[in-house]
Image (cartoon, rainbow, N blue to C red):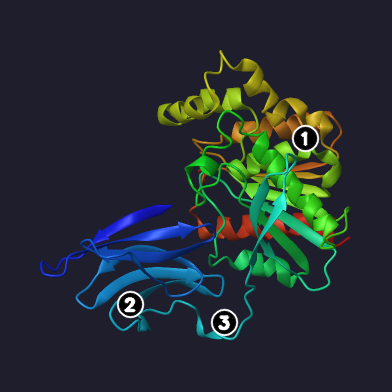
Amino acid sequence: DDTQPAWSRSGDAQRIGWVHSEGARTSFQFKKGSDVVKQKKVGDGVHYFPQFTDEGVVILYEDPRHPCDLWKINLEDDSIQQLTNSLPAELQGAEFIQPEEVFYPSKDGTQIPALLYRAKNSTRAVIEIHGGPNWLYQFLWDPMMSYMVSRGWTVLAPNYRGSSGYGKKWQNASRYDMGGVDTDDCAAGANYLIENNLADKSKITVTGRSHGGFLTMTCMTMYPELWAAGSAVVPFLNWFKSHKNSREDLQHWNIENMGDPEDNKELWHSHSPYFFLDKVNAPVQFICGGNDPRCPASDSIDARDKLVELGKEVELLLYKDEGHAFLDVENVIDAEVKRMEFLAKALER
């Protein structure tokens, strides 16, 4: 994928540049006139928003060991200079886990890319599912991953079909099947962990945010035997209700990617985990915002009530003044702490 174009401001040395993505890593590519494309990078991480200068390019960069900062790359002599440093001094020597990109077979044999954060001698693991779905896990600054590994949990972050970063064909591969093939891809990650002795089959949890929260629940309803617990953050569970309660632009997105709810009623029903909550056989946690326009809190409340009626173990954390993305730092921290505590109950008992 090529995104975020930039043009030089110098009339005598006109260059065009862009951010080039190859899966979990990115680089800065550029060319002058009809010259060949050249490539520069700060490291094996993620680059953003390039801006040309007289000598080179200023760009934002982050990776699992460095939070996002401004860097300057000299395009003539390849020198690199860090312009800002947002890592607190007390964390300069801290260990932040570097993931590795792995591939594993899904249900139909398709190879699924994922980032694997290995914990030493671990038998416990978390499948961490990204939202979007047109997004992906990259070599990003993500201290929560390092925190989970520090507790002895191996973390697998799948870039399931529907993710961006691997070309349009991959990005569109879950269209009209959201909650189907992408669920298969995430659930297959649990089998990968078991087969490679990275986790005990009774010590795997699943969690995700937004579309990742939705997939957390499709995993728990379609593959209930795999999970010790699941935490769904700002999820939707009922395509019909979520569609009805969403903004008009979001309704358009639903129809574009899952078809008309009346014409495709059976598809919308079969891919809504709310209708299959009786299949769940592990503790569930819902974390949601009371003013969420995309994944209404009512979906989580309805699912909580139904799970209670079914005699399932469930907890609901409702942050009444938050939307889809939490803005109050205290709520962000509280939600993450309670998510980790919930997963720990299943993994460390």
Badge 1 element: helix
Confirm or deny contact between disc 1 and disc 3 (CB under 8 A). no
Residue 180 vertical position relative to residue 128 in the rendered view, above or below: above
Q: How far apart are marks 3 and 2 (CA)?
A: 23 Å
Q: What residue type is labelled 3?
A: Leu
Confirm or deny contact between disc 1 and disc 2 (CB under 8 A). no
Q: Which of 64 and 317 is in front in this view?
A: 64
Q: Where is residue 341 in the image (x, y as percent from the top left)?
A: 75, 59
Q: Name the residue under label 2.
A: 72
Q: Which of marks 3 and 2 is in front?
A: 2
Q: Alpha-carbon neighbours of circle 1 within 10 Å: few (<14), some, or many (≥20)?
A: many
Residue 276 vertical position relative to residue 111 in the rendered view, above or below: above
- State which tag comes first along the sequence, 1 or 3: 3
User: In which quadrant is the C terminus drawn?
Assistant: bottom right
Q: Where is residue 3 in the image (x, y as percent from the top left)?
A: 37, 53
Q: What residue type is labelled 2?
A: Lys
Name the outermost residue toward the left: 11
Picture residue at 41% right of the left edge, 30% below the top: 249
Total numbered circles: 3
Q: Nearer the viewer, mark 1 or mark 2?
A: 2
- Label ID, residue 221: 1
Answer with left or right where residue 208 lies relative to residue 62: right
Q: How far apart are marks 1 and 2 (CA)?
A: 48 Å
- State which tag comes first along the sequence, 3 or 2: 2
Q: Alpha-carbon neighbours of circle 3 within 10 Å: few (<14), some, or many (≥20)?
A: few
Q: How far apart are marks 1 and 3 (CA)?
A: 40 Å
Picture residue at 87% right of the left edge, 33% below the top: 311
Badge 2 element: strand
- State which tag comes first along the sequence, 1 or 2: 2
Badge 3 element: helix
Q: Name the residue under label 3.
A: 91
